[in-house]
Image (cartoon, rainbow, N blue to C red):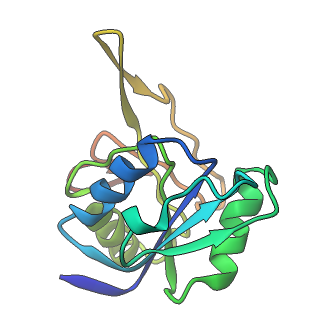
Amino acid sequence: MISEELTVVIPTIGRDSLYRAVESVRSQSIHAAEIIVVDDSGVAAVDEKRLPGCVVLRTTGRLGAAAARNAAMRHAKGDLIAVVDDDEESLPQHLAVALESLRQHPEVDVVSSRALVRQAGVTRVLPTDVYRSPSRSLTTCTGGTCGDHEIGGS
């Protein structure tokens, strides 16, 4: 199923892990209408031939992840933006759970999740705490909960 409202943004400085991150997004149970990769390397480090169907934007170089995300958001066609780091691989239900959380809780503007970090044979869950805004406009979803609300999965 394609979500016409969803744009996935991936800022990068050209790391090889970018291509795994894009495949992870393409392997989601719900597909984004567009994937925007922002090459912030300044040296055209992204091989567009390896990213068919993706929109590739280029900055003047090393403006930082926030500036790269902002450039992509200005270009995005979707009403909803998912940001994926270039070294991230998401579980197949990640985007579907986030979208369902937003639909069930219209008072929530931002949904995020914890990460399983596997390094040197050790798996850790990060972050270890949850931020909850008093206004509830920013809520972090972790371990099956979104604020005080139960959701399915992470």
**Number of marks drawn:** 0
- For this rendering, which residue is in front, 88 or 108? 88
Residue 137 can be seen, yes or no: no
Quadrant housing residue 66: bottom right
Residue 8 on image: x %, y %: 46, 69
Q: Going by the image, does 72 lie left or right of 63?
A: left
Residue 88 placement: quadrant: top left
Q: Name the image quarter holding residue 100.
A: bottom left
Q: Is residue 17 above or below residue 97?
A: above
91 versus 27 height, above or below: above
Q: Residue at x 64, y 52 (%)?
A: 133
Left or right, 48 with respect to 118, comes to right
Q: Position of residue 56 (x, y in %)?
A: 55, 72
* For residue 42, side relative to residue 140 (left or right): right
Percent position (x, y) of residue 26? 27, 65
The residue lying at 23 percent from left, 72 percent from top is: 30
Q: Nearer the viewer, residue 60 or 146?
A: 60
Residue occupying the point 28% across, 10% down: 121
Residue under the image location 45 percent in, 28 percent down: 126
The x, y position of residue 31, in whole percent, is 27, 75
Q: Quadrant of the N terminus?
A: bottom left
Is any part of residue 149 visible from this angle?
Answer: yes
